[in-house]
Image (cartoon, grey):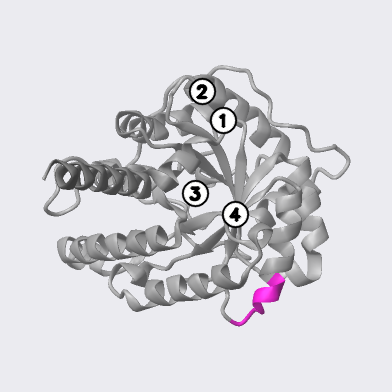
């Protein structure tokens, strides 16, 4: 009897340890990122065939540590494998990128995405595997955001859980983009803000703090950073480089690459003390490169690390959610 109980106890301890490890697998990897890391989106994966050298050189010169690479089922898996192998040798992580507003209502596209990723990962060499998943859903672009928001969010809630379960099965970190104003909404059936619910569920969040001055960026991101601190999750702060159809306030397109770097330095000075701050993401590779190409006579400098910032008034209007040139339409 004593031996049986001892064996059961050991089994229970092992089960709990495995459960804890599975639940924390992705998060620990996300927390390992340094604040100096920079990410960018690559919405056109066909660039891997035509200009992969340019992409990797650009990443190296701009301290890019993570690439969010769009998945296109029409591309050969060997194209992804070859590129990821080269990126890995350069110390760059590659995350599988996908998402569309309809993912909030229909599980089939995200299920197909996980199925494609599962098949890819199982056939890829260790240095050719995706390091994680990055999703960009943006359900507020659907008409239901105005006409039937509670039903839309309830559906999205279920689909988020399904997507995260798929990532767990693959043993991958999973992150998501959200706009800064999600702290002004709630997830049906949950307490707290919509942003805090999503931060709690995903392993990491990228806040689309799309503004063109350090003080405004720091201001609109502060609530999500506070939620990330409370929940122990990493938060990246994203900025825009593509032209906006709404207002120039949203993007650095008019100001240029040097000004962008100077403002990110000031943002880092303002929020770098937050335990949740996990660096910057620049949207997107094509727009960012064009911004730098327009200053071709100036060698792109590393992001500065000092400065100061103030405060700005937050707006509740969804901004900078239009698909820019080079980004796959959703």
Q: Does the residue at mark 1 contact the one at mark 3 (Cβ under 8 Å)?
A: no
Label 1, on which residue? 35
Q: Does the residue at mark 1 contact the one at mark 2 (Cβ under 8 Å)?
A: yes
- Mark 4 or mark 2, earlier in chain: 4
Q: Residue at x 39, y 48 (%)?
A: 179
Q: Residues under labels 3 and 4: Cα distance?
A: 9 Å
SS for dot 1: loop
Mark 1 against mark 3, which lies toward the viewer? 1
- Mark 3 or mark 2, earlier in chain: 3
Within-10-Å neighbours for mark 2: few <14, some 14–19, many 20+: some
Q: Which residues are magenta?
A: 74-79
Q: Does the residue at mark 4 contact the one at mark 2 (Cβ under 8 Å)?
A: no
Within-10-Å neighbours for mark 3: few <14, some 14–19, many 20+: few
Q: Quadrant where the N terminus lies?
A: top left
Label 3, on which residue? 247
Q: Residue at x 54, y 32 (%)?
A: 213
Q: Residue at x 67, y 43 (%)?
A: 64
Residue 2 left/right relative to 171: left
Q: Does the residue at mark 1 contact the one at mark 4 (Cβ under 8 Å)?
A: no
Q: Residues under labels 1 and 2: Cα distance?
A: 8 Å
Label 4, on which residue? 243
Q: Which mark is residue 84?
A: none
């Amino acid at each position: 009897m004593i031996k049986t109980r001892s064996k059961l106890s050991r089994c229970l301890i092992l089960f709990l340890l495995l459960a804890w490890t599975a639940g924390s697998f992705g998060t620990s990897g996300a927390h390992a990122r340094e604040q100096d890391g920079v990410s960018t989106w690559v919405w056109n994966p066909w660039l891997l065939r035509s200009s992969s050298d340019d992409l990797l050189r650009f990443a190296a010169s701009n301290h890019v540590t993570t690439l969010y690479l769009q998945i296109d089922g029409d591309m050969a898996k060997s194209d992804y494998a070859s590129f990821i192998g080269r990126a890995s040798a350069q110390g760059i992580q590659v995350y599988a990128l996908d998402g569309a507003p309809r993912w909030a209502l229909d599980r089939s596209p995200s299920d197909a995405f996980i199925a494609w990723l599962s098949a890819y990962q199982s056939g890829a060499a260790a240095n050719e595997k995706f390091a994680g998943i990055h999703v960009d859903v943006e359900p507020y672009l659907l008409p239901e955001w105005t006409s039937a928001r509670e039903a839309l969010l309830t559906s999205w809630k279920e689909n988020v859980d399904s997507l995260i379960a798929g990532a767990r099965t693959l043993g991958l970190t999973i992150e998501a983009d959200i706009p800064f104003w999600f702290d002004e909404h709630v997830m049906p059936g949950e307490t707290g803000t919509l942003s805090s619910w999503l931060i709690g569920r995903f392993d990491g969040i990228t806040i689309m703090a799309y503004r063109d001055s350090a003080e405004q960026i720091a201001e609109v991101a502060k609530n999500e950073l506070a939620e990330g601190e409370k929940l122990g999750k990493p938060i990246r702060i994203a900025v825009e480089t593509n032209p906006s159809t709404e207002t120039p306030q949203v993007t650095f397109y008019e100001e240029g690459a040097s000004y962008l770097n100077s403002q990110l330095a000031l943002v880092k000075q303002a929020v770098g003390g937050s335990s949740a701050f996990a660096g910057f993401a620049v949207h997107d590779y094509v727009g960012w490169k064009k911004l730098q190409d327009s200053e071709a006579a100036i060698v792109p400098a590393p992001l500065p690390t000092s400065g100061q910032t103030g405060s700005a008034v937050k707006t509740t209007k969804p901004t900078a959610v239009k698909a820019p040139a080079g980004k796959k339409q959703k």
